Amino acid sequence: MRGESVVVVGAGQAGCQVAVSLREQGHRGPITLIGDEKAPPYQRPPLTKAYLAGETDLAGLVLRQDSYYDDHGVKLIKGERVIGVDRQARVAVLGCARTVRYDHLVFATGARPRPLPIPGAEHVLNLRSVADADAIKERLEGQIGLDVVVIGGGFIGLEFAAVVRKLRHEVTVVEAQPQVMQRAVSAATAEQLVNRHRSEGVQILTGTGVAAVKEGLVELTDGTVLVADLVVAGIGVIPNTEIAQRAGLAVDNGIVVDAHLRTVDPRIHALGDCARFASTHAGGLIRLESVQNATDQGTTVAAAILGSAEPYTALPWFWSDQYDVKLQTAGLTNGHDRTVTVGDPAEGKFSVFCFKRGRLIGIEAYNRPIDFLMGRRILENGNALTPEIVAQPGFDLRASQQKAA
Amino acid sequence: MPKITYVAHDGVETVVDVAQDDTVMRGAVLNGIKGIVAQCGGGASCGTCHVYIDPENTKPLSQMHQVEDELLYFTACERRENSRLSCQIPVTEEQDGLVVHMPEKQL
């Protein structure tokens, strides 16, 4: 049997994982992996870290060697955009008017930087792709002491700020919300991150929007004017859902899929940054932008195409490297109503246990990898931790679980 | 290029050329060797690139840092004296000929 044909639209971490997992799980049919970037599939996280710092190059980012795709019968089409999907004819239409027939189609189209809705946005660079990172590197190359303004204090903005500071530039981060990384971490963790950035000499302004960007200047909503040789924005992303929408699939801040990552069309799945899925951990539809989500969903989609009925239930987790801080989050801490901090923030090693209605929903481990790994385990398997238990003096997560077991 | 030998749990050996300054983990992943998962891509965050260094090994290896040491308590297969996270072992000419054994599972 020749096996069914799978077309994966998007060759980022999620799309690549689907192709790899299909082969690992024994799929025999043709696989076509289509990406609109010129580079072969690569990891994005190092773009704000080692790549920008010049510690690695594109060869150090690629997910698989070039020969892997040929050797494993994965047809990789680079630098081509899929512009439409005809569900009746079961074909994907490429920008060059070529069509590729499918038995299963996978949307792994990712997301694009949210544009800044202000005058002068054309002076602002983004950091999402290797091409974006190269453009930024070119502007910083061979110089020190440039004034760099970062719009947005999320994962991307703060990681970028840390690296640019290490490259000896003057950095100001402007965050419109009262707290940095508001969407991602608790106030306790955000505070320590801000302290750390300030101690490195990075200026962080919160609760301030950007009114306009001009050549060499950034005007804030409070009237402040910042000098800027380079302005980079990281204010979130917009999922790439247009093709799915035109194909008549449900779209609502992401391509809507069920717990099996399937759209209403049983031949079409969606995953990664572009997909809004039914999450057991969130208790509703969510869209996640993370490596864990992309890779774990890739494995699930591959299995689903091969006939598995297993839903996607993986526990979400995230990490961020800033200076020598390794922040690792197990679970979804968003929506917590109580936190308990274990360890000593002043020493730069602590964990924030996040509870919602008395139930542990996530742990933010700040240079405490054991709490992160232990946390993943207990959040996956269920636990009886309460804020009162965690708040006891000398509480130790690993010891508490050994006792429980 | 330095050659690294990956021995799967069932004993199958694969020899791979690993570029200078890549890691033992990257050498496996880039070439699609099953048995090393590396969920986090080398960030020392997940403990899914666990290997056992060949007991006969004489090649010098990078020192183990605290994070790696702690992660090794959480690997899917038992930690042994020769356990390492392969993402924390950079490859140079000095490691040419290194043999690593992959555990039964990583997840």
Image: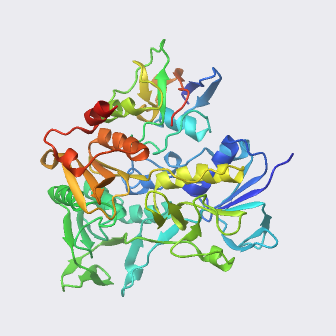
Residue B1 in the image: above or below residue A339: above
Q: Is residue A350 visible?
A: no
Q: Is residue B34 visible?
A: yes
| Residue A28 picture quarter | top right
Q: What residue appears at the point 51 percent right and 37 percent down from the top-left corner?
A: B107
Residue A40 in the image: above or below residue A262: above
| Quadrant of image for the N terminus of chain A | top right
| Residue A247 picture quarter | bottom right
Q: What residue appears at the point 64 percent right and 73 percent down from the top-left corner?
A: A244
Viewer-side residue, A383 vs B42: A383
Image position, residue A95 (x, y; %): 71, 73
A107 vs A44, left or right, is: right
Image position, residue A144 (x, y; %): 26, 60
Image position, residue A296 (x, y; %): 54, 50
Q: Give the number of marks.
A: 0
| Residue A45 picture quarter | bottom left
Viewer-side residue, B23 vs A347: A347
A188 vs B38, left or right, is: left
Viewer-side residue, A14 vs A77: A14
Q: What residue appears at the point 47 percent right and 56 percent down from the top-left corner?
A: A44
Viewer-side residue, B93 vs A235: A235
Image position, residue A112 (x, y; %): 50, 70
Identity of the residue furthest to the right in this view:
A1
Task: Report the colour scheme.
Answer: rainbow
Residue A140 in the image: above or below residue A50: below
